Image (cartoon, rainbow, N blue to C red):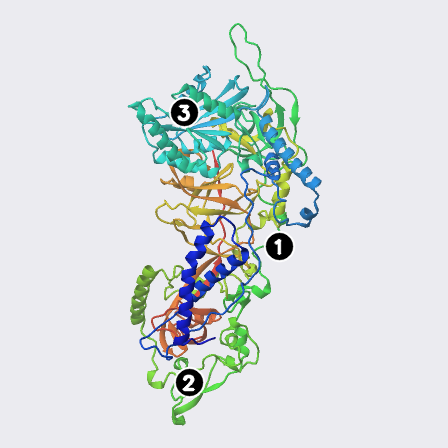
Amino acid sequence: MHLFHADERVVRLIDVIRLILAVPRFLSITINHKKEIHPSIRRQHLYAVGYLFKVASLPFRFRAGGNSNMAPIVAQQHHHRSTTKQTQKSFKSRHASKGSLKEASKGKVETFERGNRKTPHQQVMSKFDRRNRAKQLRINKDNEHAKAINVFAGKDGAPRIVAVVPLCKDVSSAGAVRSLNASLDIEDEVPEAGWTRVNVDRFKQKIQYLVVQRDLLASLDACRIADFVVFILSGEEEVDEEGELILKAVESQGISNCFTVVQALDKIEPAKRRPQVVSSLKSYITHWLPTTERVFSLDSRQESNNLVRSICTTTTKGVKWREQRSYMFIEDIAWAGGKSAVNEDGTGEVVITGVVRGQGLKADRLAQVGDWGDFQVEKIVAAPLEARKKTKDDSMALDTEGDDVLERPSEDQDDLADLAPEETIMEDATTYTPSVAPSERKGVLLDDHHYFSDEEDETAPTRTRRLPKGTSKYQSAWYIDDVSDSGSDLEDFDMEDADELDKPETFEPADGEEGMDVDGRAMTEGGPSEYPQSEMFLDPSPEDEAEQIEAYRKSRKNEADEDLEFPDEIELHPNVNAQERLIRYRGLKSLKTSAWETEEDRPYEPNEWPRLLEISDYKRTATKFMREAWAGGVKPGTRVNVHIRGVPLSFQGSRPLAMYSLLRHEHKKTSCNYSILLSSEYEGNVKAKTEMVVQCGPRRMVINPLFSQAGNTPNNVHKFDRFLHPGQSAIASFIGPLTWGNVPVLYFERTTGQSSEEMDSDVQPADSTSRSSLRLIGTGTSLPPSMNRVIAKRIILTGHPYKINKRIVTVRYMFFNDIDVKWFKSLPLWTRRGRSGFIKESLGTHGYFKATFDGKINPMDAVAVSLYKRVWPRTAKMWQA
């Protein structure tokens, strides 16, 4: 570091001037000289220029009459750059390299060898092995594509099922099918509601149109079985609320390939507005179905022909839950015995005709026929569609049933029992062990133990206290400790309750003061004269106490309504015994980590609970039975007659649309858990146990679900939710049939009431929905069932801090007799401001008690205690015709 004086800076300034004069000469020599400049001269000039800029950057300061008293200037120190690495430019090429071209030409294969290889097997794979694996993946992909296409290939191939769903009032499904047939010069009769089969010779395919009327359940049933769904829009009217309801429900239950068409587009005048209308309809439908590429006009023969071409050549995407099972569209239903019953129980045999789709159809598995229910398969017979030559009377092709039986049930056939036999119950659920008998319980259950039994009170030694003369037994309960006044007017008094501080045993925190005393001394000790004799008071009269309680609860109600601080708060009547009223409730130190004693719940569990299906490892078991459906059975694409036994004759007037083959054990009942997300468009809240119509895969049921919080907890205890708010998600639990895998779930609500006779019956008639409209209120997914999931209903009892002395508080209005205080003495107390405490002892006989907290509480605070009981899900009612 150097100090530059004024005379030195003058010399430097002269050098700078010389360099400035030399720079133009250097530049003129460099530009105008034709020959190269000698390197030594070039270096000198460059050094001069560099020195010029270095010197010019120094901060010179001059003052009049320059002296040496100017501020010192610090010269910049030389430093090296932090690193010697130079960043190289990335390779840029307008043409791809050979490696990238080869990579692109290999096909769409998952090449996981790019980048970091994660597993040791990937690291040791040779180049030949990697190419061989890619080839195998490509071959498997081709085989899957060919398998999906081969179902429709050939003369005896399965028809492509197309559901035609109208979304507007002024459109017609039958008219849309006629327009599609007219584009291929096909003149077949099309019913207003039903199905029709069309042979498209141009594309060598068969199409089976499902003509659906504008009805919610009919649209859901048709789209659930269809390979393609065609939505019909109107060029003149907008989609109303009913159309949007159908669109939401169909999209939520799972949809395969879908197309959109528009009718009455030629009626729009002038003609130049028609492209704008089509663009507007496309914008609307892409909001619900983003994969929609275009909207076809049925008024154009060319566009109708293009739509049929797309239906005949497009690979079906399918629905995952549907493709995991075997299913078939019911083309015909025949009763073998006619109107007379075949069996003594009033049931008969039904022959269902259709083409097997999905997985192979097995006779050992149960078949669900629409809304009829689950039935056993008697046999599966081939029923090829043979086309005879037309006779002179131009007779059409007839369906003939072959005599060859494709499959019969074996000894492994599933039965129709939905509950385990009663012999499997090893012990009676209503019996108690002596340790948990109700007669021996002397305190509320906290976690897994009952505290404060009468034996402790009987065997505990008593200690005399010094009280004023004339103090009665009742008045002595209001003295916390020995009175600190002069001993002239004191006499010995036997205290019945033992002082628990004298016990040398170690207690848990749930024991109250002893459990909180971690350091060997109490957190808060009251002085000997905490409540002086002058402040002693008697219990108020019943009339005054009733008025005080009513006024206090009224203020608490308003506060709860405004702040919603205590959503689970209840109020006990002063004349109600809390011990009897809350006999099923218990305390928990932590809702998420405390152990839940299940033996206490056995007397209250449903009668069928021990007979439900219990699955230990759901993931492994579900994978096992899903893979079991992959092999065997009647090959998909085969037209068969399925003989079903045990069908009630009352179903003769109805006609189901589809039949689904259930996986193993899917008929048995268990504790089902479905996720539910309440629609944000739904006004109001949904109360727990409210009747809902739920659709899960091929089933439709009437349930009264219990709502509980989602998530995983260490103790598998989840809080019960009394209400479900719009946009809120929860878990809906009920007792119903098992469903393997994750299947979409739809929740509907009836908008009109129903008669009490129908409500009391175990079977809900299907035609009741036709009389009353349904409203989609939520969606969800089926989750693994669990009988160990505990749904805990919480209630909160609140009290008012009557007197506060540091951390010792007298609480009232939580209980109304000393027996309840002793019963709930082990429960931990808490306040809404975050303080925790415990009950120390009862005061008087009207439910007052002394409590100790971990800090001083606010007089405006409320003391509360939480109680929990297990609630059990209700049984679902199957939706039957």
Distance between the alpha carbons at the discs numbered 2 and 1: 55 Å
Q: Quadrant of residue 850?
A: bottom left
The residue singled out by tag 2 in the image is 527
The residue singled out by tag 3 in the image is 173
**Where 872 falls versus 527 (above or below)?**
above
| Amino acid type of the residue tagged 2 in the rendering | Gly
**Where 532 falls versus 123 (above or below)?**
below
SS of the residue at dot 1?
Answer: loop
Circle 1: is it few (<14), some (14-19), or many (20+) Cα within 10 Å? Answer: few
The residue singled out by tag 1 in the image is 427
User: Percent position (x, y) of residue 673?
Assistant: 51, 48
Q: Quadrant of residue 741?
A: top right
Q: Nearer the viewer, residue 254 or 27?
A: 27
| Amino acid type of the residue tagged 1 in the rendering | Glu
**Residue drawn at x 56%, y 51% as measured from the top left:** 88
SS of the residue at dot 3?
Answer: helix
Along the horizontal axis of the image, is 518 left or right of 294?
right
